[in-house]
Amino acid sequence: MSFLRTLLTATASVVLTATAAFAAPAASLLKGLKLPVPSGLPSLFAANAVGQISLNGQLGGTPEGLLAKLRASLSSQGYRERTINTVSGPWGLNLVFDPPAGTSVDGTPDGKTAVLVLQATALGPGKLNLNVRYEGL
């Protein structure tokens, strides 16, 4: 009986360890994104984001043009847009994507699902500020 208990305990430990190993840190997932921006966006502290990190930077263009490029780029990487959360206008845009199947974001609060949030704010004609982060919903 004690052999069986030891075997079950060891198996449970291996399963829990293997499950945790599939969760990737938010920072590495963000850095691995192929975003349609001229140069990589620098990391920025983000208190409410999973992993407390986001990517943030300024770029040229319009909200409509950026929206189309983000949709195409992220969809090709396996992300699925939550269209109910999509809002855009001359002021900027808000997009929410579910990560590709099998992707787990380390640090996601219990009972929540991590989603990729992208928000751009128009700073002036042809100039946007883009913020990209994971949040738990």
Image (spheres, helix red, strand yellow):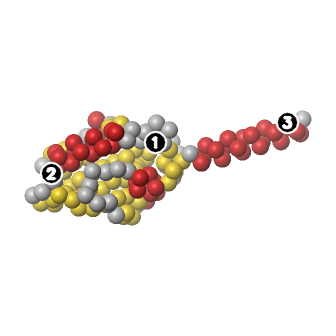
The residue labelled by disc 3 is 4
Which dot, 3 or 2, sits closer to the camera? Answer: 2
- Quick one: SS at disc 2? loop
Q: Looking at numbered disc 2 in the image, what kind of residue is underneath it? A: Thr
Q: Please tell me which residue is depicted at 88% across the width and 39% down the height of the picture.
A: 3
Q: Is residue 98 above or below residue 36?
A: above
Q: Position of residue 36 (x, y in %)?
A: 27, 51
Q: Nearer the viewer, mark 1 or mark 2?
A: 2
Which is nearer the N-term, disc 1 or disc 3?
3
Residue 121 lies, with reference to residue 88, above or below; the image says below
> Is 24 left or right of 92, judged from the image as shown?
right
Whole-angstrom CA distance, mark 3 to mark 2, is: 64 Å
Picture residue at 33% right of the left edge, 38% below the top: 75
* Residue type beneath disc 1: Thr
Provide residue 100's location: percent of width, then percent of height: 43, 39
Which label number is shown at residue 113? 1
Q: Residue at x 78, y 38 (%)?
A: 8
Which of marks 2 and 1 precedes in the sequence? Answer: 2
Task: Tell me the CA gap for discs 1 and 2.
Answer: 30 Å
Residue with the mark numbered 2: 62
